[in-house]
Amino acid sequence: MTGRTDKPVSPSVECDTPSSSGLSGALPIIRVENLTVAYGEEIILRDVSFEVFAGEVMAVLGRSGCGKSTLFKAMIGLVDNVRGTVYIDGNLVKPMSEGGTEHILRKVGVLFQSGALFSSFTVAENVAFPLRQFTGLSERNIEHIVKMKLSQVGLSGKEHYLPSELSGGMQKRAALARAMALDPKILFFDEPSAGLDPVTSAELDLTILHITEALNTTIVIVTHELASIFSVASRAIMLDGDEKGIIAIGTPDELRSSCNDSRVQQFFGRSTAAGKNKEKHSKNC
């Protein structure tokens, strides 16, 4: 990787509030340290550092092109050109090109924006896939787990449907059930509400809340949907494409009401005014 790396983005940009340090008494289950990601010569993220605490829902926010999906992929080892480190539950995450780390991958579940269901598999077969791939469970036990996971996301009775026979919201729920199949400690969601109508999106938010409350699952969610941010997120980090890193950390309410950075205000206020006025930018969020 080449390019400038002399402009660190550190926790000095966070909102100066107690909640910026996470849930009271919780320990970090994810640590991102000085993460730099480039595509060719272009630096996308530079020296990004933050922590996610066990049991919280951390939202990753920002305008299009700011590096949200790049950060998402780097955190689970799907990006090669990376400098810095990511630790999940105390274990170093390696890029897939370096062999990855299966025991880490088994600790996380991933819901991609498209859902990424196998179109020729039934819903049950999709959910069963990681169980057959990574466990030695009997088919009877797999069938029991599949039914339980589908029940948790409100898809009981849909076992024999193909993805094409489901609505967009049901497809996302089926993909969520598959992500949960191995009982991961952490779930990663990339724009889960993309393509969904507001009602279906709100229903998915309630499902996410139910999961984290019932199972104490840690969730990292990439989104730009304000309704979802305020519905599900314990804390949020906001990325900026010009800074190539984090410009604010805090609860959604803190970022909306207490952060003086104009870029944060514009995002939460859906405003375009002064979008490039650097003089109004403040890092004392």
Image: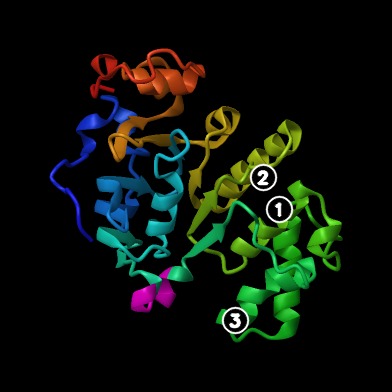
Give SS at disc 1.
helix
Mark 3 nearby-residue class (10 Å; few <14, some 14–19, many ≥20)? few
* Mark closer to the chain start, 1 or 2: 1
Mark 1 nearby-residue class (10 Å; few <14, some 14–19, many ≥20)? many
Q: Position of residue 256 (x, y in %)?
A: 43, 19
Residue 173's mark? 1
Specify the amino acid type for callout 2: Thr
Mark 2 nearby-residue class (10 Å; few <14, some 14–19, many ≥20)? some
> Observer-nearest residue: 113 or 273?
273
> Mark 3 to mark 2: distance in Å?
26 Å
Q: Is residue 145 visible?
A: no
- Which residue carries the number 2 mark? 207
Q: Position of residue 150 (x, y in %)?
A: 74, 60
Instruction: Let me know if residue 15 is in the magenta part.
Output: no
Specify the amino acid type for callout 1: Arg
Q: Eyeballing the image, is 94 above or below 141?
A: above
Residue 232, picture quadrant: top right
Residue 174, picture quadrant: bottom right
Q: Which residues are magenta?
A: 97-104
The residue drawn where x is 48% and y is 37% is 64
Q: Eyeballing the image, is 235 above or below 262?
A: below
Give SS at disc 2.
helix
Q: Nearer the viewer, mark 1 or mark 2?
A: 1
Give SS at disc 3.
helix
Q: Nearer the viewer, mark 3 or mark 2?
A: 3
Q: Position of residue 121 (x, y in %)?
A: 77, 72
